[in-house]
Amino acid sequence: MMSGKLYGIGVGPGDPELLTLKAHRILASSKVVAYPAPDDGVSFARTIVEQFMSGEQTEIPIVIPMRVERFPAAQIYDEKAAEIATHLRAGQDVVVLCEGDPFFYGSFMYLFERLSGEFECEIVPGVSSLMASAAALQRPLAARNDVLTICPAPLGDDVLLERFQSGDAIAIIKIGRHFARVRDLIEKAGLLERAGYLERVTLDTQQVMPLSQVGADKAPYFSMILIYKGAEDWIKSLEMPVEKN
């Protein structure tokens, strides 16, 4: 019996209409669907595509504890890779849902490294939160020879400040509990008025505004800060908050 095929499909940042036609086709035809899920709530990736699922598919939640303390991530991915491999060896294709894009800070890459040596794999790219945030802010990310820098917020202060200084356009992700510290660093770098704040882009609860207008000391996990200090005159787009249609 031939082995099944492993698919990593990007399901986008939240709006189900941003699912690609290819991802929809593969999801609809698959009998086994895996997805990341927190240990204290529902899977966001599954919620995005719930209306497109048949209700008869075998589901494999990949439960990841959502807390500050370290957890045995390698063990979790080892166990779930073994479970997925059982279905693949039985000739069943397996779809793994990935928020945004599978290879843009996506958890699918950890399953890919465990399974791609034995099984055929296909990656279906998705709309990343980075692209969706630029669209919501209504300001291009970069142009011409601008250097776009992506900074995870947990980086140290010195590293972040150096990145802020060297890049023409900066995207800060994984903000959460680091929000107040990152905002202070942005102000220290003299970039506060050039920064846009976004959370839960493409959802009904979307918030888009200049960072200088945000009074909170922390941000949701699904939030991002975009800064532009390149050659183009795009700063004027931050004069008023942008509302979701």
Image: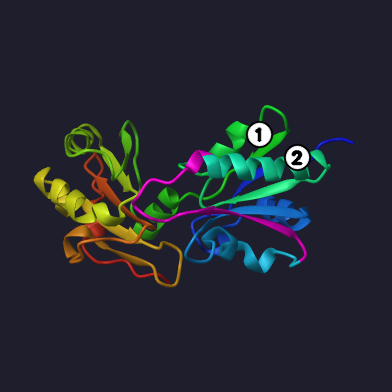
For the question of whether residue 48 can be seen, the reply is: yes
Tell me the SS state at disc 1.
Answer: helix
Q: Provide residue 151's location: percent of width, then percent of height.
A: 31, 40
**Residue denoted by label 2:** 5
Q: Can you tell which quarter of the image residue 165 is in?
A: top left
Residue situated in front as seen by the camera: 53 or 22: 53
Amino acid type, residue under disc 2 in the picture: Lys
**Residue denoted by label 1:** 115
Q: Can you tell which quarter of the image residue 132 is in?
A: bottom left
Name the quarter where the C terminus is drawn: bottom left
In this rendering, position of residue 75 left or right of residue 90: left
Q: Give yes or no for residue 141 being in the magenta stretch.
A: no
Label located before the other in sequence (1 or 2): 2
In this rendering, position of residue 25 left or right of residue 16: right
Q: Provide residue 26's location: percent of width, then percent of height.
A: 73, 51
In this rendering, position of residue 100 left or right of residue 174: right
Label for residue 86?
A: none
For the question of whether residue 103 can be seen, the reply is: no
Residue situated in front as seen by the camera: 234 or 189: 189
Q: Distance between the residues labelled 1 and 2?
A: 10 Å
Tell me the SS state at disc 2.
Answer: loop
Residue at image position (22%, 52%) is: 195
Amino acid type, residue under disc 1 in the picture: Leu
Up the image or down, 60 lies above or below 111; here it is below
- Labels 1, 2: front one: 1
Residue at image position (19%, 33%) is: 162
Please state the extent of the stretch shown in magenta in the rendering. Answer: 56-74
Residue at image position (52%, 61%) is: 44
Would you say the residues marked 1 and 2 are in contact, meaning their CB atoms lie under 8 Å apart?
A: no
